[in-house]
């Protein structure tokens, strides 16, 4: 009995240690803003990470290195009066998509490494211009240099900045290093036009959303609403061509006002980077939201997948056309259908009970009641609403319901640990 008690206590202790480890690793994510806020010498660098919306993107990643520069180096950069969009490109070149702690810098295989950056991940950096060369030099020095497409000798980028010190490290999660100066890059420093100066429909048309873009141009109210919101912040969810082409017959049945509302429903009047969408679940107002007309939707994420739920259907974000403050345009795999314009699919009727022997006329009474119920069903209040929901609404509703209860990996681990604890205590 004593032996059994000791084994039980050992099992409980092991479970508690495992639980502590899980909760520590799953609840303490890094926050670059908070890390740098402890060091006043990086306040300008920290400020521009927030201003360019790079900070939430950094926080979203799990293996990353930030090469920070001090206030003096940032002053040199800002003295050239770059646009905020150019500053974002330059700073994104200082975010390496790999973990380099101070120790690893001096243990690089063959003494040199080429690291991909967040600038490379945007897709706007041609060739290898979004990579940074890291070289372990003699005497304990480590050099950094932005790669260049003009490097014909392919011998690595010129080393223009050097490792100063490690600011803070969370091993294999995030490393914040200080380097001596801003990495120069002709590509990253090139003037970047503001998204408001770009043609919204042109961007859509060139990247698989031509049907939606062409339809948007046919609605003066909708296109003006989109254009007027770009400077203050705009996020667009653009249905891919196949999805919107299949929807066109239903779209043509809407009134002029209904068509404008449907199109405006695919935009929200704030800038949301993909990292921001992945980290935020909840209700979103749209460009069509107006007082009593809610026209809202819900954003939900499951790992790397972001979904948009209306009261009628669910769409997934499938790609990024542009993500530069204050404009973001994403492709979605379905047309977003607002409840204000479309009826939800009616639930399948329950099977009729078998008639009782004593009620010979029961089938007739049931049929009469069914007709009355259908006649009394309230009509949709909006004049723009078609008689029926879209063909795939019922199927989509079933898909949505099947995913109604989801538990992350961490919750399964916690449940398992809880069961182990209960079992252990019962044995004691």
Image (cartoon, helix red, strand yellow):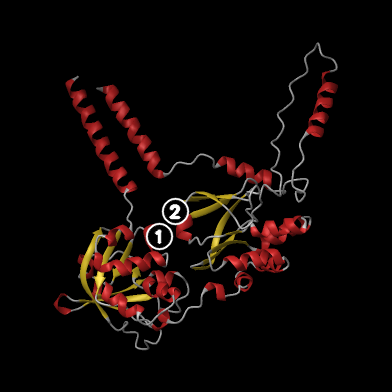
For label 1, the SS is helix
The spot of residue 398 in percent (x, y) is 62, 41
Q: Are marks 2 and 1 in contact (CB under 8 Å)?
A: yes
In the picture as drawn, the residue positioned furthest to the left comes out as: 139
* Residue 352 to residue 296: above or below: above
The label shown at residue 229 is none
Q: Position of residue 211 (x, y in %)?
A: 69, 66
Local SS, label 2: helix
The crowding category of the residue bearing disc 2, from other C-alpha atoms within 10 Å (few below 14, some 14 to 19, many at least 20), is some
Classify residue 34 as left or right of residue 320.
Answer: left
Q: Which residue is located at x 32 percent, y 82 percent?
A: 157
Residue 97 visible in image:
no
The quarter in which the C terminus is drawn is top left
> What residue is shown with label 1?
56
> x%, y% of residue 165?
20, 69
- Which residue is label 2 attached to? 279
């Amino acid at each position: 009995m004593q032996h059994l008690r000791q084994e039980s206590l050992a099992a409980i202790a092991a479970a508690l240690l495992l639980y502590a480890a899980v909760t520590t690793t799953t609840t303490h994510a890094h926050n670059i803003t908070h890390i740098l806020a402890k060091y006043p010498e990086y306040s300008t660098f920290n400020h521009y990470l927030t201003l360019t919306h790079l900070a939430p993107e950094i926080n979203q990643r799990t293996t990353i290195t930030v090469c920070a520069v001090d206030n003096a180096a940032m002053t040199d950069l800002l003295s050239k009066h770059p646009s905020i969009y150019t500053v974002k490109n330059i700073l994104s070149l200082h975010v390496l998509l790999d973990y380099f702690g101070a120790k690893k810098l001096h243990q690089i295989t063959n003494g040199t490494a080429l690291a991909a950056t967040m600038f490379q991940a945007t897709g706007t950096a041609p060739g290898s211009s979004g990579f940074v060369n890291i070289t372990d030099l003699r005497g304990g020095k480590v050099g950094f240099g932005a790669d260049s497409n003009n490097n014909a000798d392919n011998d690595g980028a010129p080393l223009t900045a050097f490792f100063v010190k490690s600011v803070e490290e969370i091993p294999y999660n995030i490393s914040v290093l200080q380097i001596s100066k801003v990495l120069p890059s002709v590509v990253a420093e090139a003037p970047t036009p503001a998204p408001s100066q770009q043609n919204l429909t042109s961007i859509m048309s060139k990247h698989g959303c031509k049907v939606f873009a062409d339809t948007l141009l046919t609605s003066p109210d909708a296109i003006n609403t989109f254009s007027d919101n770009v400077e203050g912040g705009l996020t667009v969810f653009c249905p891919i061509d196949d999805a919107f082409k299949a929807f066109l017959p239903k779209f043509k049945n809407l009134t002029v006002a209904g068509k404008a509302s449907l199109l405006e429903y695919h935009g929200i009047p704030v800038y949301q980077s993909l990292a921001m969408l992945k980290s935020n679940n909840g209700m979103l107002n749209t460009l069509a939201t107006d007082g009593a007309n809610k026209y809202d939707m819900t954003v939900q994420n499951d790992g790397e997948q972001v979904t948009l739920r209306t009261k009628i259907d669910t769409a997934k974000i499938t790609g990024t056309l542009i993500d530069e403050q204050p404009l973001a345009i994403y492709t979605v795999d379905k047309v977003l259908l607002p409840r204000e314009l479309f009826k939800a699919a009616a639930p399948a009727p329950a099977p009729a009970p078998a008639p009782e022997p004593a009620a010979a006329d029961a089938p007739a009474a049931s049929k009469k009641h069914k007709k009355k119920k259908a006649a009394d069903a309230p009509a949709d209040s909006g004049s723009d609403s078609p008689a029926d929901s879209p063909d795939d609404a019922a199927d989509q509703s079933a898909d949505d319901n099947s995913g109604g209860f989801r538990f992350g990996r961490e919750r399964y681990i916690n449940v398992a640990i809880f069961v182990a604890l209960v079992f252990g205590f019962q044995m004691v």
